[in-house]
Amino acid sequence: MNGASLYDDPDFLDGYRRLRSSGAALNEPLEIPAMNAALPPVAGARVVDLGCGEGELAVRLAEAGAAEVLAVDASEQMLAAATAHPRVRYQRADLARFDVPAGSADLVVSSMALHYVEEFAELVARVARWLSPGGAFVFTIEHPVLTAPLVAADCVVDDYAAEGRRERTWIVDSVIKYHRTIGSIVATLHRHGFRLERLDEPLPTPEEVAANPALAIHRRRPPILLIAARALELLTGNIGEEDRRGTG
């Protein structure tokens, strides 16, 4: 089941919402604070949120002063439950085909969604075109040490160099994700005119583990990779042959 259909699957959606409401998810203790720390000032910014889900990040950005937020997701059910805000516009679209005019965004964000995207390099090329010069691209994904093994196992890093499709059981069976090395991700950003500004691996503190023992495993291996990059110039050229092959 790929990312475009996963969150419309009733069994997955029920399990996902129960996970979020239980307090056992990584969003509140790790991902959201790390994302907030990495984001540039957003007052007056034009923002695109890729894989917005129910709009939590989009609304936070609008409330922080963003002029407009275009929040995009492939899931009909996620968007149906999204939080309304006067400066947030929701759009249903597959990230593999979504596009906006060149130079129309100052900030592109994505929270725990891009590991579902098969053609990452092509998406980065589009993001580079969307951003105004000096614009920022800030995203979190499942950490490559977790996506790497062909057969998933906690705290075992294997098959790291073999990039590509993985199938996992997460709430439901046969969830499709895509593994890339950290080096490959950073190289793809550089190739499309981005300067890396921040690379973070959010981990719980010992005090957080003491308060919530379910977080203990995340001190043994990082669950999340966060990257913040800055567009050095507006890129409008064609996608290169390497990106059409899907590498990086």
Image: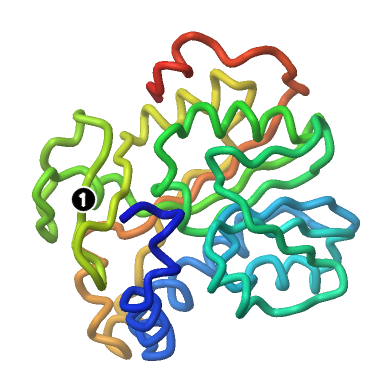
Q: Position of residue 12 (x, y in %)?
A: 33, 74
Image: 190 above or below 212: above
Residue drawn at (13%, 57%) of the image = 155
Tell me the colour scheme of the image.
rainbow
Residue drawn at (84%, 61%) of the image = 66
Quarter assignment of residue 222 = bottom left
State left or right for residue 180 relative to residue 56: left
Q: Position of residue 114 (x, y in %)?
A: 46, 47
Residue that label 1 marks: 167
State left or right for residue 87 relative to residue 27: right
How many labels, in total?
A: 1
Image: 100 above or below 83: above
Residue drawn at (26%, 39%) of the image = 165
Quarter assignment of residue 196 = top right
Q: Position of residue 169 (x, y in %)?
A: 19, 63
Image: 210 above or below 165: below
